[in-house]
Image: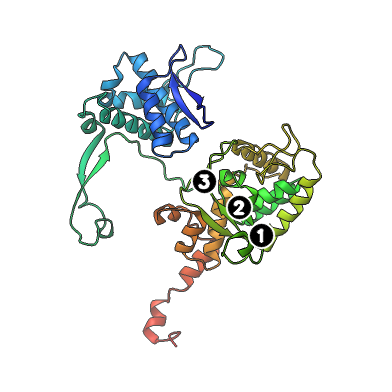
Amino acid sequence: MRAFPVRMPSGARYWTVVDEDLRPVPVADAYLRHTRFGRDGAESTTKSYAVAVALLLRWCATAGVEWRSAAGQLGAFMLWLRHVPAPRADGQAVVLSGPGAAPVRGARRINAVLAAVRGFLVFAADQGEVSREVLHQLYELADSRSLPAEARGEDGAWKLRMRPRHRLQEPSMRPGRASDEDAVALLRACRSARDRLLVLMLCRAGLRRSEAVGLRREDIHFLLDSTGLGCSFPGSHLHVVRRENVNAAWAKSRHARVVPVDRLLVRAHDQYVLERAGITGAADSDFVFVNLFRPPVGAAMKPDAVNDLFAALSRRAGLTETVRPHALRHGFAGNVLDAGGTVDELQDLLGHASISSTQVYVHPSPERLRQAVDRVGSPRTAETGEGTR
């Protein structure tokens, strides 16, 4: 069993699960098509889900477990995930990790696989492929009395909630925030105006890598007044719009958003336009970011190419660790808050539907933490009344 990409006659793409004879597994294929087209999920989402479902079916075949009853044995599946690596591409036998060896998959990865597997089995139950008893095997009922009062709702009444039965405790790892020094080092390592603009799109506008390489020319409103373009938003800005793109770049949010930009980014864009105009084959594409120095010239950049670029820039800049594209988005968020921005403003700038997603991007700088402590008066000051005027 393995994940396999599918292109529909309309051009839309998704991922499915095929067996050894390259035949789609019917219920898995139905689940992944529903995720992609019924729930408007990203192609990349169906890819990760297809990999997870393929792992489940592979384990069932190895362990002699009927997949319809797999929900009752997910503990054994989790153990298998921890210690059995993926099949080798060259067909040779994999080497199992023995006692004391590091797990081949961490808790975060295993929990992601379990989330996709639960969705698959719930879908199968809804379609009548498995008994609805599977829901009791996947989830347990818990009440909300142990939650903080604000999480129980305004009335404070306790409610029943469903909690996954199978989940590993993930290590507390806060996503990294790229420093301004890292961003400057990357910019200095750039060898083209295109690459400088791409770095600035992430660190000065907070775009995700897929949002950046999914931009079209019509999304760029770098004018003081864009009313002539049918847009009333003041000042220079860009629009992030979810579309089906040939480079598989996908805006995560279903809702379009407007992101204001500064003069530094506008100037970098102007330099890139001049650079691109001088390269044969690059002028006709509607995409903002296109291949300039490798074939096919003029084709839209792919999201994975952004990762490759940042790895090369990090090496060229002499950085000890590779700066990931998403770290610049975290750096942008931290800079907005450090400059006095509010979390609700940041939520709109980042395009989050829930403010809880924005909280992950709250990275107080050391200076802000120091100022927070310094604002707390000492007991002696409070007793004498000093410093209160």
Mark nearer the N terminus (3 vs 1): 1
Query: Which residue ends up furthest to the right in the rendered image?
Result: 278
Q: Residue at x 53, y 39 (%)?
A: 244
- In this figure, which residue is indicated by the disc labeled 1? 222
Query: Which quadrant: the C terminus?
Result: bottom left
- Element type where label 2 sits in the image: helix
Give the CA distance from mark 3 to mark 1: 20 Å
Placement of 358 over or under 281, stated as above or below: below
Amino acid type, label 2: Asp
Could you say which is closer to the camera, residue 123 or residue 154? Answer: 123
Question: Visible in this render: residue 182?
Answer: no
Coloring scheme used: rainbow
- In this figure, which residue is indicated by the disc labeled 2? 219
User: Residue 102: x percent and y percent?
Assistant: 46, 28
User: Residue 10: x percent and y percent?
Assistant: 52, 31
- In this figure, which residue is indicated by the disc labeled 3? 242
Placement of 39 over or under 125, stated as above or below: below
Give the CA distance from mark 2 to mark 3: 11 Å
Question: Visible in this render: residue 380?
Answer: yes
Amino acid type, label 1: Phe
Q: Quadrant of residue 38?
A: top left
Q: Is residue 125 left or right of residue 378?
A: left
Report if the CB atoms under discs 3 and 1 are less than 8 Å apart: no
